[in-house]
Image (tube, rainbow, N blue to C red):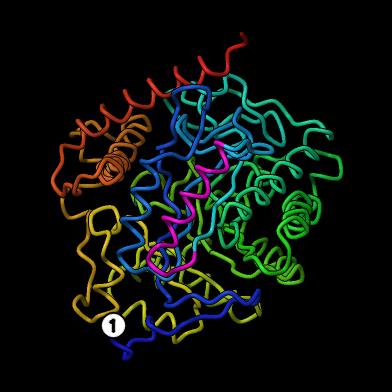
Amino acid sequence: MTNNTPLARPLELPCGLELPNRIAKAAMTEGLADLDGDHAGLAGERIERLYRTWAEGGPGLQISGNIMVDGRYRERPANVVVDGEQNETERAGLARFAAAAKSGGGLAIAQISHAGRQSPKAIAAEPVGPSAVAMKMPGGLFGKPRALSEDEILDVVDRFAVSAGELCAAGFDGVQVHSAHGYLLSEFLNPLANRRDDRWGGSLDNRARLLIATVRAVRERIGPGKALSVKLNSSDFQKGGFSFADCLRVVEMLDAEGINLLEISGGNYEQPRMMGFDGLEPVFEEDVRESTRAREAYFMGYAEKVIETASLPIMVTGGFRTRAAMEAAIEQGVAVIGIGRPFCLHPDAARRLLSGEWDELPAPEKHFRLGPGWLGPHSSSDLLKAANGFAAMSYFYRNIIRMADGETPKAKMNLWGALIRHQMQEGKDAKRVARLAAPG
């Protein structure tokens, strides 16, 4: 590796753990848990193989995809689930998962999450959320949620803590509490989704109460020597929703809690800015400056403002493609550069950037067309625009599956075919989960 790039600098986190370089394989949902036998969410050989492949590519940090703290409310049917004290078989699977993710010499952090109202109807006919506010999504993918009770909210806090403890005991270097992209903790922050009038809703202090309580419970469970990260939206990009001003106030709260790494992201399923899919929905101008939109990194402009006020290390994910832009971000105070989709085609991307072999990541998006026009001249409806986005996502899902099965990624792929195969697989997985969850 070359020492001429800032990306190659080690980084010591406040907890004492050290990243060998500044490139992170960001969290991407895998959908690879074993669903056969008696376990509905076990970490098995496929996810182990995938993370060992990525580890060999040289990132200083790997963050897992959603590991669910409640198997009833998953983001996908085949998520890994750690929703209580684990038995011997479950712990062994998690230990192999952690070892594979760390096998290249980098750190491994497990992302823990509760899907909330973004748990698909095929998994949860009645999902849960802060309030009974339905998703504004076409296609009927999500059921109308019911509002969590006080006792259930406290149970969510405990579930995050238990999951974190089990994962760290299995060998992960820490956990990332997922409070972005419209999942449960993010929903509580969002006044459009959270219309409660008790201590969990209303003011931002109340809306942030669940996140802060979760962070405190997780830290108590994992101890000071493990990394505690939070993924937080810079904005939901919805008028009247969680704003950047809200974000800055929550960052102050998290800074006071002493978390070790804050990842800045944005958007949710209703406004999927985190995927970089311009054209799916309009983005409000008060939330996104043109100067930010013109950059590679979707959220760099927000990160700069956070860095001005926060003392904790900042990770920025989304849109980075050139080594020059990554290096510039490091020099501007970003601690870690998160890369996602390029790793789906080039698992050795980190090593090639660090060695100087590559100055720019090959853009996976060049292999297909994004935007509402992809589905034809009449694709301006919300349903077709959503299908366009999900088809593009399916392209990356299929390549993740290829690596998990020991195959090489495939650059050129029919997006309609990828979408159909993905939906068929999700349907099969949902039926398996339902069968395993059925009494008797």
Residue at 60% over, 39% down: 82
Q: Is residue 342 left or right of residue 316?
A: left
- Is 104 magenta? The answer is yes
Foreground residue, 439 or 117?
A: 439
Q: Is residue 248 on the magenta stretch?
A: no
Q: Nearer the viewer, residue 297 or 428?
A: 428
Q: Quadrant of residue 184?
A: top right
Residue under numbered circle 1: 1
Q: Residue furthest front?
A: 88
Characterize the magenta stretch by its predominant secondary structure: helix
Check disc 1 and give the amino acid type.
Answer: Met
Quarter of the image containing the N terminus?
A: bottom left
Q: Position of residue 47 (x, y in %)?
A: 39, 44
Magenta stretch in the rendered image: 89-107
Query: What kind of element bears circle 1?
Result: loop
Above or below, comparing residue 92 to residue 298 in the picture: above
Question: Quick check: 384 above or below 55?
Answer: above
Number of labelled discs?
Answer: 1
Q: Residue at x 53, y 64 (%)?
A: 264
Going by the picture, which residue comes out furthest to the bottom? Answer: 4
**Given the current orientation, which residue lies at the most extreme left position?**
412
Which of 279 and 339 lies nearest the eye of the viewer?
A: 339
Q: Position of residue 258 (x, y in %)?
A: 72, 71
Dividing the image into 4 quarters, which one contains the C terminus?
top right
Rendering coords of residue 224 (x, y %): 72, 68
Which residue is pictured at 62% across the width and 66% down the height? 227
Circle 1 residues within 10 Å: few <14, some 14–19, many ≥20 = few
Please tell me whether residue 103 is drawn above or below residue 267 in the rendered image: below
Q: As drawn, is 181 to the left or to the right of 32?
A: right
Position of residue 224 relative to residue 388, above or below, is below
